[in-house]
Structures are given as C-alpha cells and as structure tokens.
Image: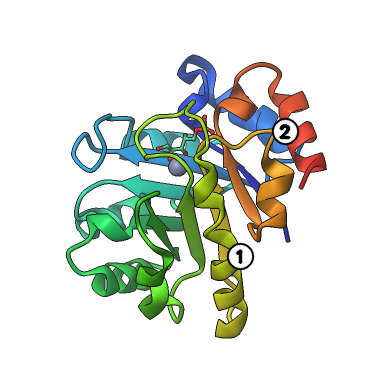
C-alpha cells in the first residue's frame, strides 16, 4: 500500500487544525510530525504540547519523526501524547536496539531513520524489529530543501532486504519530495512519501490529490 504523509512542519500553525483536516479529507494517509531539539539538528520545531493538541482533533495516524539526541528519554511521553509510530535516528541513539525496544514496549510502531551520509548497511541488525525505515533525502533540520538524488539510490537495496526479511516494513522517503520526483521515488522502492512544502504551500487539497495520483 502506498501512503502520503504530509509534514506539518510546512503548515501554517495559525490554522494548523484546519490544514490537517483539509489534507486528511483530500486523501492524506498519515500525518508526519517533525520534532527537532536544536542539538541533533540545528533547528527547534515543536514538541509534546502541539502533538497532544492536534491529537484531540483527528484520528489520523501520527508518524512522529524524532530528530532529537537520545530519544529513548522521551519515547513514553510521545506515545502518551498520541504518536502511533515513532521514528528515531540511527545516528542519535547511544543504544539503538534498546531505543527501538522502548518504542515497541510503548505500543507504538517502530521506525528508524538514516541521514544522507549514513550507509543502509547500519540497518542490518534491526530488520527484525522495525515497522518503518525512513531514508532522509536531505540533511534533516529544515523543510523546503532540494532532494539529494544519490540518496534515492539507497532504496532498491533496502527494498530487497525488506522482502528477504519476510516482514511488513514500510519504506519512507523524506526531504525535497514533490510532484517532480514522487513517481521516481516510488519506482525506486519507496511505499511512503513525506511531503511538507509540496503539500502545505499553496492549495493543500489540490496538492494532496496531485501527489496521490503520482503514487
Ligand atoms: C526535514 C524534515 C522533513 C521536512 C520535509 O528535516 O524531516 O520532514 O519537513 O519538508 P519538505 O517536504 O519541504 O522537504
Ligand atoms: Zn521528517
């Protein structure tokens, strides 16, 4: 199943609830929530209170992307405020396995992400536990960047490895994804795409429908 996960980082926070509703009604499959701590990445976005607040207004599946150092400290809290899936960065964890186990124990689906400079081979030990692999196609930290084409080359190999695992693991791509490259990314093996600017800048309903048509 192919899924579109709009990133609210690019939304207008002045009317966030309405924009989420528009994206959902237009056909968005889940909602990508980017949490940044100013340490793992240079910027700071938002955290628990925002998630808790939007949770009250929608049943959408919350795909929470933690760009924070030592995320194990906050797994249970993010689950409590409404995360359905929690993705942590391989590069941000002292003990990746324990962090993924903590996510699983919280009841959330388990995600792991790699930055553009990280080889997919580091994921090898975790195919038995993850529900989602997130391949970053920009340096994490900011929306609105241009996709790094070489990162797309990681997808076919990961897709093959997922098939060999015999497990259902989503393969998500995040960063610089839009109408110009969505089809190519899906063809390379992704089944889930994140789009911030490409959804929330301009006509949200038209943007969601156009992207879904390409997937
Ligand atoms: C970047 C975030 C992305 C970002 C994507 O660090 O993880 O989810 O919001 O934004 P666009 O789609 O504008 O590149
Ligand atoms: Zn993200």
For image coordinates 55% across by 31% down, the residue present is 196
Secondary structure at badge 2 equals helix
For image coordinates 20% across by 69% down, the residue present is 95
Q: Quadrant of the N terminus?
A: bottom right
Q: Nearer the viewer, residue 89 or 182?
A: 182
For image coordinates 51% across by 48% down, the residue present is 150
| Mark found first going from the N terminus, 1 or 2 | 1
The residue tagged 1 is 156
Residue 194 location, x and y as percent? 57, 43
Residue 115 location, x and y as percent? 37, 50
Structure colour scheme:
rainbow
Q: CA distance from mark 1 to mark 2?
A: 25 Å
Which numbered dot is residue 6?
none
Q: Nearer the viewer, residue 187 or 72?
A: 187
Compared with residue 54, is residue 61 higher up or lower down, i.e. above or below?
A: below
Compared with residue 67, is residue 84 higher up or lower down, i.e. above or below?
A: below
The residue tagged 2 is 208
Near mark 2 (Cα within 10 A), the count class, few <14, some 14-19 or many ≥20, is many
Asked if residue 44 can be seen in this view, the reply is yes
């Amino acid at each position: 199943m192919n899924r579109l996960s709009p990133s609210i980082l690019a939304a207008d926070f002045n009317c966030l609830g309405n924009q989420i509703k528009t994206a959902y009604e237009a056909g968005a499959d889940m909602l990508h929530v980017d949490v940044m701590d100013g340490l793992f990445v240079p910027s700071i976005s938002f955290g628990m209170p925002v998630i808790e607040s939007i949770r009250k207004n929608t049943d959408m599946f919350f795909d929470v992307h933690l760009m924070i150092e030592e995320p194990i400290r906050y797994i249970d809290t993010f689950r409590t405020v409404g995360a359905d899936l929690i993705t942590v960065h391989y590069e941000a964890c002292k003990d990746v396995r324990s962090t993924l186990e903590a996510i699983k124990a919280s009841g959330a689906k388990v995600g792991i992400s790699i930055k553009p400079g990280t080889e997919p081979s580091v994921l090898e030990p975790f195919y038995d536990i993850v529900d989602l692999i997130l391949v970053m196609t920009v340096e994490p930290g900011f929306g609105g960047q241009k996709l790094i084409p070489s990162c797309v080359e990681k997808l076919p190999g990961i897709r093959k490895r997922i098939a060999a695992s015999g497990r259902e693991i989503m393969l998500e791509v995040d960063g610089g994804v839009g109408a110009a490259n969505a089809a190519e990314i899906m063809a390379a093996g992704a089944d889930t795409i994140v789009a911030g600017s490409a959804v929330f800048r301009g006509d949200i309903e038209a943007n969601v429908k156009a992207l879904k048509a390409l997937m």
